[in-house]
Amino acid sequence: MLIWIVLAVVLLPLVVFALAVRPVLARLPRLRRAAVALQRRAAEAEALQETAVTLQQRAEDVQRRLDTTSRRLAVIKAKRG
């Protein structure tokens, strides 16, 4: 009789633990896929950030050229008349 009590005290918590862990283990593949997708999106965001910085630098360069061209055009117009 004592052995049955000991087995119940030991096995019952193990069964409850297994039932509690089962849903978590079932979700692990989806969690791994989500983590991979998140890493991929982070890499894409970093690449987009680098592209945005490059575009910003180009825009600033074009603005400088436009300013220089405007000043030259003003000088040319002033010489004409």
Image: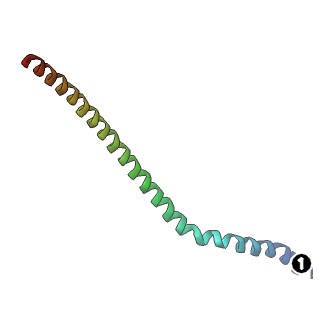
In the rendered view, tell whether residue 46 sits above or below residue 36.
above
> From the viewer's perspective, is 25 left or right of 63?
right
Quarter in which the C terminus is drawn? top left
The residue sitting at 11% across, 22% down in the picture is 77
> From the viewer's perspective, is 54 left or right of 35?
left
Mark 1, Cα crowd under 10 Å, few <14 / some 14-19 / many 20+, is few
Quarter in which the N terminus is drawn? bottom right
Image coordinates of residue 65 in percent, x first then y, are: 20, 29
Q: How many marks?
A: 1
Q: Nearer the viewer, residue 7 or 29?
A: 29
- Name the quadrant containing residue 63: top left
Please identify the residue farthest to the bottom as the structure is shown. 1
Please identify the residue farthest to the right as the structure is shown. 1
Which element type, helix, strand or loop, lies under badge 1?
A: helix
> From the viewer's perspective, is 58 left or right of 73?
right
The residue sitting at 13% across, 19% down in the picture is 75
Q: Which residue is mark 1?
A: 5
- Name the quadrant containing residue 50: top left
> From the viewer's perspective, is 39 left or right of 23?
left
Q: Nearer the viewer, residue 13 or 22?
A: 22
Image coordinates of residue 23 in percent, x first then y, are: 65, 72
Please identify the residue farthest to the front as the structure is shown. 81
The residue sitting at 38% across, 52% down in the picture is 44
In the rendered view, tell whether residue 6 sits above or below residue 36.
below
Give the residue type at disc 1.
Ile
Q: Nearer the viewer, residue 64 or 5?
A: 64
In the rendered view, tell whether residue 61 sits above or below residue 72.
below
Q: What colour scheme was applied to this rendering of the protein?
A: rainbow
In the rendered view, tell whether residue 74 sits above or below residue 43.
above
The residue sitting at 34% across, 39% down in the picture is 53
